[in-house]
Image (cartoon, grey):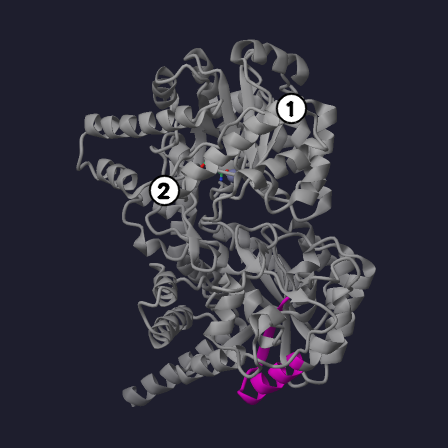
Amino acid sequence: AYDLLFKVRLQSFYIFELLLDRTMASHIVGYPRMGPKRELKFALESFWDGKTSADDLLKVASDVRSNIWKQMADAGIKYIPSNTFSYYDQVLDTTAMLGAVPPRYNWKGGEIGFDTYFSMARGNASVPAMEMTKWFDTNYHYIVPELGPDVAFSYASHKAVSEFKEAKALGVDTVPVMVGPVSYLLLSKPAKGVEKTFNLLSLLDKILPVYKQVITELKEAGASWIQFDEATLVKDLESHQLEAFTKAYSELNSACSGLNILVATYFADITSDAFKTLTSLPAVTGYTFDLVRGKKTLDLIKSSFPSGKYLFAGVVDGRNIWANDLAESLGILESLQGVVGKDKLVVSTSCSLLHTAVDLVNETKLDNEIKSWLAFAAQKIVEVNALAKALAGKKDEAYFSANAAAHASKKSSPRVTNEAVQKAADGLKDSAHRRATNVSARLDAQQKKLNLPLLPTTTIGSFPQTIDIRRVRREYKAKKITEEDYIKAMKEEISKVVKLQEELDIDVLVHGEPERNDMVEYFGEQLSGFAFTANGWVQSYGSRCVKPPIIYGDVSRPKAMTVFWSSMAQEMTKRPMKGMLTGPVTILNWSFVRNDQPRFKTCYQIALAIKNEVEDLEKAGIKVIQIDEAALREGLPLRKAEHAFYLDWAVRSFRITNVGVQDSTQIHTHMCYSNFNDIIHSIIDMDADVITIENSRSDEKLLSVFREGIKYGAGIGPGVYDIHSPRIPSMEEIAERINKTLAVLNRNILWVNPDCGLKTRKYDEVNPALSNMVTAAKKIRTEL
Ligand code: GLN
Ligand code: ZN
């Protein structure tokens, strides 16, 4: 009898569990695909090098996928994504799915294989790659589809279906994810020849039949939900663009019958117009919203969420590495439960976890206190599920209180808060931080000291980082060689670089940056408030990953960072030696930034640290200081309404760094390639004395920058050759480029320099290229 009773109780317990499970809904928008130790990266690169076979690559990839699915299933995630894996990029996967291969790749039809796929991604011996551009405001880059009126779409990659089946065979029911049809078109560019005239959205009718085929196949394979990523919905869209969404999803409606369709948006607040369009779409049964970056979206949901639909509430941040504030999230979720109904609320991530690091487990060097403040993708899955469980009445009290304790420890930690820094940064608000004299007067004062020829020549900073340099740095870091030996090796290197530049007859020299592995990490390692991971890699494009530093506390500079090297280099030459710094905005934009204070506040703190460095360099006799803001444009918010605010504090941060120097100290800044057109006034507003800009890929666009430059009077150095290619530019080619620029720009303000730093190049490329550059500048000087 006891046995029976026990059985009955057990059974009812199970039934109870089951009931709970139904209300316990969790979802992940997408997941990193590189693997916890970048397994996919290494598999891809060795395949590309011909060292391993396609089968080897397939095997690594399927292991990466199955591990992810199992991990999510074990954690208890209900809506597990599939097809968020990619061999290169999810937009390129969609291009393959649609058979939209540009003609130059000579694709003959049929299922697209690695050959065609990787040719589009990376180019091949005879054809260059397709263009790559930033994915919204992230540091991920996608392959831009090239579409014209003649593209013959066909269903040419069954990846979405095969990955769904693959998961199913492993016992995991997944939600296949695809880039939605309208976003796909809006993220494309018109093919060559029709750039100015072609309306991309006119292709909607042609791509929808392929989408229908995929949907039908997925349904046949047993899918019950399909997710379409339509993040362009958070951008500032015009009404005809919004109408395209209505048109597309009406058209897909019949193919979707019997299926649940989830449309995912992320990265920003959604406008009320877009919200209205989205929530009225036929065929769609659920929506994901980014509730981390989308604070106003929460109000839209509360005031007008359609009844009967599912809300996938993105409360766990996919763009950062911080542990979620579970108590706060639970509060938000509980308030939403009242709005959309208990059975229609699903806990989710703010966006794909692609933009965060993979697994904290692999961080052996971070101390436990800092680790308790963090959550990478693997930990975020657990957070999402814990929130879903709590909503369903099964709160894991121990987990929640550990989380609360971690947040409390962070708030009160002296490692995080530095009163003096807080005060100094707060005190910055009220001033414009502008140098007192205008740029033309400053350039005159500088010229008296520097005595430069017309068209002065310079480089952007780094010289080739040879295997030897990297080895010495590594050995020093691992304490295998002494500081003395390290300094000696670096000094030799610097002196080589200085001699080379003197031989080449370059006017303003650099020390070559041999002591730096990375322009942000180098400074982060010397500033307080930064932490570094061992494996916190985030995909940037293809097999390339970056490992952003973590800014966890108030930033300060315990001691000078570059003065030692710069003054050592200056002592080696009579020519001016540029001090070389990374600017605050770039340090900020290339790091994981704390989320317990506004970004601008962190940026001001970094600016103050760099300001101290600038002033120390000046004191040490450095007459020219370059403050790189390679990533200023990158931080521009998605929504236009937020641009002005960002640009104001970003530009102000830059000015803070050098407002204190004398007129005769020349401040340079450098920017990598980006679309400058819409931020030209902000660039001028940075009030640098000389701006060097990457140019070789964007001549036309930069012309407007030049023109504004004439009015402004600052020195401008549009790169005269592309350093991303091993190709050596001829003297004539560089001369022609300089002459073209001279047609637009006043000769008194033009500088001659390469596009960017030379660290990835080899000396047998750099020597002749720079020699041709200097010869070209000299030749043109005689003609002026
Ligand atoms: N000073 C840096 C270098 O030359 C600039 C790099 C960059 O702009 N990305 O390496
Ligand atoms: Zn650059």
Question: Where is residue 393 shown, x and y percent of the image?
Answer: 49, 66
Q: Residue furthest right?
A: 239
Residue position marked by numbered label 2 in the rendering: 532
Q: In this view, does 243 lie to the left or right of 497?
A: right
Q: What element carries label 2?
A: loop
Which residue is more in the foreground, 47 or 420? 47
Q: Is residue 25 left or right of residue 50?
A: right
Question: Where is residue 7 shown, x and y percent of the image?
Answer: 34, 86
Kind of residue at disc 1: Ile
Kind of residue at disc 2: Phe
Which residue is more in the foreground, 232 or 290? 232
Label 1 crowd (10 A; few <14 / some 14-19 / many >=20): many
446 above or below 223?
Answer: above
Question: Where is residue 250 shown, x and y percent of the image?
Answer: 76, 77
- Residue drawn 45% across the image and 61% down it: 32
Is residue 38 something one can see in this rendering?
yes
- Residue drawn 41% across the image and 13% down it: 620
Q: Quadrant of residue 448?
A: top right
Q: Nearer the viewer, mark 1 or mark 2?
A: 1
Is residue 643 something one can see in this rendering?
no
- Is 218 in the magenta? yes
Which residue is more in the foreground, 4 or 15? 15
Q: Quadrant of the image for the C terminus? A: top right
- Residue drawn 49% across the image and 15% down it: 623
Q: In this view, does 747 lie to the left or right of 753?
A: right
- The residue stretch that appears in magenta: 210-229
Q: In this view, does 595 lie to the left or right of 652?
A: left
Residue position marked by numbered label 1 in the rendering: 749
331 above or below 485?
Answer: below
Label 2 crowd (10 A; few <14 / some 14-19 / many >=20): some
Question: Where is residue 60 shown, x and y percent of the image?
Answer: 35, 71
Which residue is more in the foreground, 670 or 173? 670
